[in-house]
Amino acid sequence: MTSIDAMAREAKLEEKLMSKVSLRLIPFMLVLYVISYLDRINISFAALQMNHDLGLSDAAFGFGGGIFFLGYCIFGIPSNLVIQRFGPRRWVSAIMVAWGLMTISFCCVKSAPQFWVLRFFLGVAEAGFFPGMILYLTYWYPGRYYGLAVARFMLAIPVAGLLGSGTAAAALSMQGIYGLAGWMWLFVVTGIPAILFGLLVWFTLPDGPHQARWLSKEEHERLDGMLGTARDTSSGAGTAALKDGFIAAVEDLAVWRCALLYFTLTVSMYGFQLWLPQIIKAFGSTSDRTTALLSSIPALFQAMGMLIVARNSDRTGERPFHLAFASSCTCLGLLVSRLSTIPWMEFAGLCLAAFGIWGSAGPFWALANNSLKRESQATGIAIINSVGNLGGFAGPWIVGLFKSSSAGFGESLIALAVASLLSMALALTARKRR
């Protein structure tokens, strides 16, 4: 057998192994993230009724939508350190049950302060999930497969948008059943799955490759070789190692640059997502149910953006220009929606913005992964996600402030477009370390 034949055979074995890993992990992880994201954005649909019932102003709702990310930021880093120390299975199981119970508790909210407090603690509970899963994927995927793996995992976002639209349309129509308002039912039906799947995680999610009984000894060794390490990444790291990794991450300028870039991305992402149903409703006189269903169409463009951009980025190995391209689509779409006076053009602009916003996800996390030192990877990912997600506080709040001082969402869309311009600039000047 020639060396070329041997390389071709090895490449096929690698592809087969990665396909096996993806088939085992990604669908289940995607379902978990769908549940997480639904419990994060369900207020965007509930607001169609809830804001009136509770007397929430645009500014109060925007603040409540964003305060989730303050709790998320504060506890994101400690949560990732816990995952690294004890493994993801126990921790993810516990926090899913916790945030499921909190989601159901929104049925008891009677005022804006209560709404804000629950949103803050929901952010605390969810803080460890996404950065933990992004770190978890590094246990299984080498760099050349990582970007697409992240994009496939993050397909949960458009799937959550599609499911959320249908679920919201049904729940909002349950007004008065058993004395509960439609928006209350929405919190019930989105909270229960988090509890059930949180219990399921305890029994099904392996902490890492060496706990996966469905991998053979040969597959374990090949995966170790592909990852460039023979260590068991799922086993608890020592206290000294965690401390060294934390210090290395804090001192790494690449971590903070990526955090700033992610901040600009999440300003647009959550400013768009948490206000989308109300933006669509402002286009014309549609019912709450119709508005919820129309919100599913941009979700399809989210999925297209995530798959198309991430796949081409992984195929070429290029990250910054793919990220800049996605951000340019976001900016153009928001401007089209702002400047047009024709409803279908405004809606088309939102779809293009959705394509760009979530098309940036795969290239961004691949770029961030390439930019970090190995020893600072776990804490670095948590810092990037936690600090970057402060944009999730800024975006919805900015939209609410602009909306409360104007007749529509025009100025809000301009503000989100400016954030995407900053994303383009930071992406084009990014440098990868490895």
Image (spheres, grey):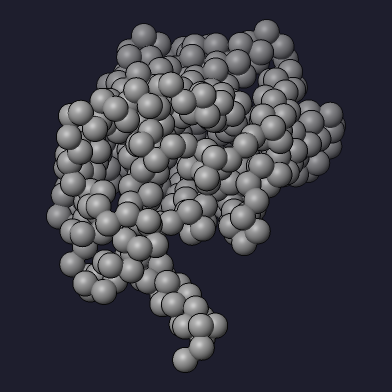
Percent coordinates x, y for residue 316 in the rendering: 65, 58
**Closest to the observer: 267 or 309?**
309
**Closest to the observer: 402 or 371?**
371
**Image check: 345 left or right of 177?**
right
User: Is residue 216 positioned above or below 168 on the image?
Assistant: below
Residue at image x 25%, y 38%?
84
Residue at image x 33%, y 68%?
222
User: Is residue 176 positioned above or below 363 on the image?
Assistant: above
Q: Is residue 8 visible?
A: yes
Q: Quadrant of residue 433?
A: top right
**Image check: 367 left or right of 233?**
right
Percent coordinates x, y for residue 429 in the rendering: 69, 32
Percent coordinates x, y for residue 392 in the rendering: 51, 25
User: Is residue 245 positioned above or below 304 on the image?
Assistant: above
Q: Is residue 186 visible?
A: no
Q: Quadrant of residue 105?
A: top left
Q: Quadrant of residue 247?
A: top left
Residue at image x 36%, y 9%?
113
